[in-house]
Image: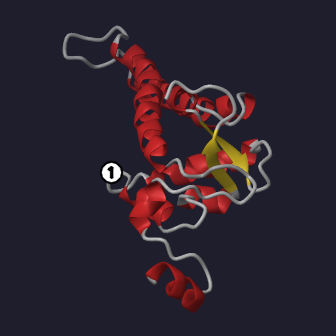
Amino acid sequence: MYERSLPRQLGRSARPIVARLWLPATDGVGDTSVVARRIAQFAVDAVASMCLAGAAMLLFVLLPTHADGSIRSGPLSTTITAGVGCVALAILLWYWVLRPAGHDGRTWGMQVLGIRVVDLSGGRASRRQLGVRWLLLFVDALALGAIGLIAILTSERRQRLGDRLAGTLVVRGRGPGLV
């Protein structure tokens, strides 16, 4: 009764939010019922991207220093710090934007879990769209990812804020994932 009357009153599907974790949601583009996979994918990708960026930071730690730990020159210290920060940022940009643009909309975590990013028509997501998603990932990740998860669970197409503004969807990917 609830399933039949409420959608007519609201003019759209009114499935309980918890059901959105498992029930299929398709609109001809692909199956977007990948919420649990997206959570696991974010954990995999966060660890992978931070390890890559952390490797750049490690180079900074390995630089020759005085006994007190300071770098030999003040201006050199500032330049090196800025350079390491730029390298780490470039690594994150590559991981979250450039690599997926060339690999069917998939990060390493998405490949493992069998999901990918597409535009709203089901086509390949552009670099601009992937860049918008990445920039808004910082907002979606606030409160240990609760902002993004709430956005996904309250969206008919299971989109986080970055997906909504970029015009993208995360769907089950073509080809085998490991899960």
Q: Which residue lies furthest to the front in this view?
A: 1
| Vertical order, 88 against 124 (above or below) | above
Q: Residue furthest left?
A: 68
| Vertical order, 85 against 42 (above or below) | above
> Does residue 126 appear in the picture of this structure?
yes
**Closer to us: 80 or 176:** 176
Left or right, 59 with reference to 172: left
> Does residue 76 appear in the picture of this structure?
no
- Which residue does the numbered mark 1 point to in the structure image? 144
| Vertical order, 139 against 125 (above or below) | below
Q: Which residue is drawn at 51% across and 50% down?
A: 137
**Closer to us: 172 or 77:** 172
Left or right, 94 with reference to 154: right
Amino acid residing under circle 1: Leu
Q: Of helix, strand and loop, which one carries label 1?
A: loop
Q: Residue at x 45, y 40 (%)?
A: 42
